Amino acid sequence: MRVALVTGGTTGIGLAIARRLTALGMRVIAGSRRPELVDGLETVALDVTDLSQVRQVIGGLARLDVLVNNAGLAGALSWDVPDDALWQAVLGTNLTGTWACSQAALGKLPDGSGRIVNIASTLGLRGAADQPAYCAAKHGVIGLTRSLALAVAARGITANAVCPGWVATDMARQRWVELGMDEAAAAAGIPAGRVNTPEEVAEVVAFLAGPAAAGINGHALPVDGGGLALP
């Protein structure tokens, strides 16, 4: 049985990914800072900003076939009033955590079939004025993915990024509150006329984690209802 580790795997997009990979017959371990039981899902305490814990948890796995770096943190930042703690937290969770988990997993992933899927964002492909840390981190995740893809290609391992736009999650709803909008307003700005679901992102991750995606390496795939196609 193939084994997958999904960081941030007990809520939102991560939970949808964990459930989809489980449905495909994998043993899925959902990492979380608060590893509560979720519908019988196997969980483990994992704070991706704690690099020693990352290496201990991943190093202790008997087998690992798929790593999904999903744990994320967003936060609006003013260019006028510095918030160094939030900057460090956003970069640490999204970018450094992805680096640490990927680096720790390389010795576990099997040649020929190992998969790393990093959850980036459409804000890794464009900007938002009040999200400098998040944009920097997610742009960094895409660059890291491309570097990693080259490092593991000769082993037959792939590393790709998925870039969701608006997705109906608690994180998105918090962002809508910050922007003074709601889901309907968000959907109005998307060519498809709706916000994506966590399950739609999970389907793309499941494809990249499977054998049919063996020839896809180092790419950043948007799941945004056509938003990035807008001028």
Image: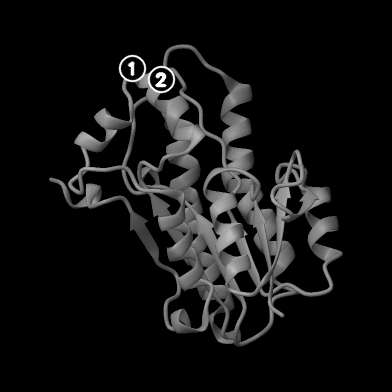
Under circle 2, the secondary element is helix
- Tell me what residue is drawn at x 57 percent, y 44 percent: 94
Under circle 1, the secondary element is loop
Residue 129 falls in image quadrant: top left
In this orientation, which residue lies closer to the viewer: 6 or 20? 20
Question: In the drawing, what numbered circle is on residue 153?
Answer: none
Query: How far apart are the two marked residues, 1 and 2, measured between alpha carbons?
Result: 5 Å
Q: Residues within 10 Å of mark 1 (few under 14, many from 20)?
A: few
Instruction: Point out the image quarter for the N terminus.
Output: bottom right
Which kind of residue does numbered mark 1 sit on? Answer: Gly
Q: Position of residue 201 (x, y in %)?
A: 43, 56
Question: In the drawing, what numbered circle is on residue 177?
Answer: 2
Q: Position of residue 55 (x, y in %)?
A: 80, 57
Which kind of residue does numbered mark 2 sit on? Answer: Val
Instruction: Report the residue that reaches farthest toward the top.
Output: 81
- Disc 1 to disc 2: CB gap under 8 Å: yes
Question: In the drawing, what numbered circle is on residue 180?
Answer: 1
Q: Image height check: is 202 above or below 210?
A: above
Q: Position of residue 210 (x, y in %)?
A: 52, 78
Q: Position of residue 197 (x, y in %)?
A: 40, 48
